[in-house]
């Protein structure tokens, strides 16, 4: 698989052409190299590393220094995929703090930074973009808010909540977001938002109607202690990490993963 450099423009063109793209979390150089070589378009140094790498029960203990450390590792292994990283809990509570945190991740190699939350983050998002750093918004189930929900629960199932998520998506696009992740929302809602927005929308546990899909690496390899029900073990049928990554990407691009039958109400 050739690994021509992927940019935000590539993902925008994919959306315009109706072509899907894949995203995978990675936290170290060797997995980054394998994923980029497999053609995974977008690599994400997610704060899920608090759970997958550090062994915590949630993402809340992850610091900006943790993300920057893993990002530098991933950057060394990357071979031309677009590289995004999470702003961890507490690192974007004000516009000035958000801009400083985003700049630190950009210095460590992030080409896009991701933050969790709705319209109330518009000012943070605007300032980060004004500093020259693209932003990916994250709506639906936002793991940094797990204690507000009382668990990792599906979001947007009732019409009022769905309307809030839709309004947040439009507001964050208007504020300058370049990408949007929708996590654990009904497929119909995710598909509607993907059609409404001009920026690429990436789903996880959100059905097959989004422009891209993301999985946590360990879930995709079937090595998480508890994998979410929407995930698939791509390693079992392929036998190597590299082949599993290629199979995951191929299934996403072909519209076979997630299956249309996963369309949640
Ligand atoms: O932290 C993470 O891995 C994420 C993805 C699941 C989207 O935010």
Image (cartoon, rainbow, N blue to C red):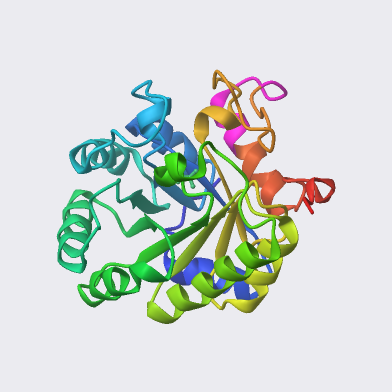
Residue 119 in the image, given as x and y percentages of width and height: 42, 71
Residue 102 in the image, given as x and y percentages of width and height: 22, 58
Q: Is residue 39 magenta?
A: no
Task: Please tell me in which quadrant of the rendered image residue 162 appears.
Answer: bottom right
Please tell me whether residue 24 is drawn above or below residue 178 in the rendered image: above
Q: Is residue 238 magenta?
A: yes
The quarter of the rendered structure image containing the N terminus is: top right
At x 62% / y 32%, what residue is drawn?
228
Task: Please tell me in which quadrant of the rendered image residue 68 appears.
Answer: top left
Left or right: where does residue 220 sit relative to residue 126?
right
Closer to us: 159 or 105: 159
Please tell me whether residue 203 is drawn above or below residue 137 in the rendered image: above
Highlighted range, magenta: 236-245
Q: How many marks?
A: 0
Residue 95 in the image, given as x and y percentages of width and height: 21, 68
At x 50% / y 53%, what residue is drawn?
41
Closer to us: 119 or 9: 119
Residue at the bottom extreme of this rendering:
174
Please tell me whether residue 10 is drawn above or below residue 150 in the rendered image: below
Left or right: where does residue 224 sit relative to residue 177?
right
At x 41% / y 62%, what residue is drawn?
136
The quarter of the rendered structure image containing the C terminus is: bottom right
At x 55% / y 38%, what residue is drawn?
152
Residue at the right extreme of this rendering:
261
Please tell me whether residue 196 is drawn above or below residue 219 in the rendered image: below
Residue 164 in the image, given as x and y percentages of width and height: 56, 69
Left or right: where does residue 214 sit relative to residue 72?
right
């Amino acid at each position: 698989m050739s690994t021509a450099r992927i940019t935000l423009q590539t993902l925008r063109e994919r959306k315009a052409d109706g072509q899907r793209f894949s995203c995978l979390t990675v936290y170290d150089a060797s997995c980054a190299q394998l994923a980029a070589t497999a053609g995974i378009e977008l690599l994400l140094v997610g704060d899920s590393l608090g759970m997958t790498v550090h062994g915590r029960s949630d993402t809340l203990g992850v610091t900006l220094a943790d993300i920057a450390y893993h990002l530098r590792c991933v950057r060394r292994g990357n071979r031309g995929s677009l590289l995004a990283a999470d702003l961890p809990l507490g690192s974007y509570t004000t516009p000035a703090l958000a801009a400083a945190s985003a700049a630190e991740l950009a210095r460590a190699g992030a080409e896009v930074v991701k933050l969790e939350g709705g319209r109330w983050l518009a000012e943070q998002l605007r300032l980060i973009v004004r500093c020259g750093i693209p932003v990916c918004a994250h709506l639906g189930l936002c793991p940094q808010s797990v204690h507000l929900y009382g668990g990792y629960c599906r979001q947007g199932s009732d019409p009022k909540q769905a309307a809030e998520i839709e309004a947040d998506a439009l507001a964050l696009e208007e504020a300058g977001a370049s990408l949007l992740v929708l996590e654990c929302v009904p497929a119909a809602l995710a598909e509607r938002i993907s059609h409404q927005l001009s920026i690429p929308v990436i789903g996880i546990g959100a059905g097959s109607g989004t422009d891209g899909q993301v999985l946590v690496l360990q879930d995709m390899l079937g090595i998480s202690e508890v994998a979410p029900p929407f995930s698939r073990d791509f390693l079992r049928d392929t036998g190597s990490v590299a082949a599993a990554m290629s199979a995951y990407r191929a299934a996403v691009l072909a519209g076979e993963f997630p299956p249309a039958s996963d369309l949640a109400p």
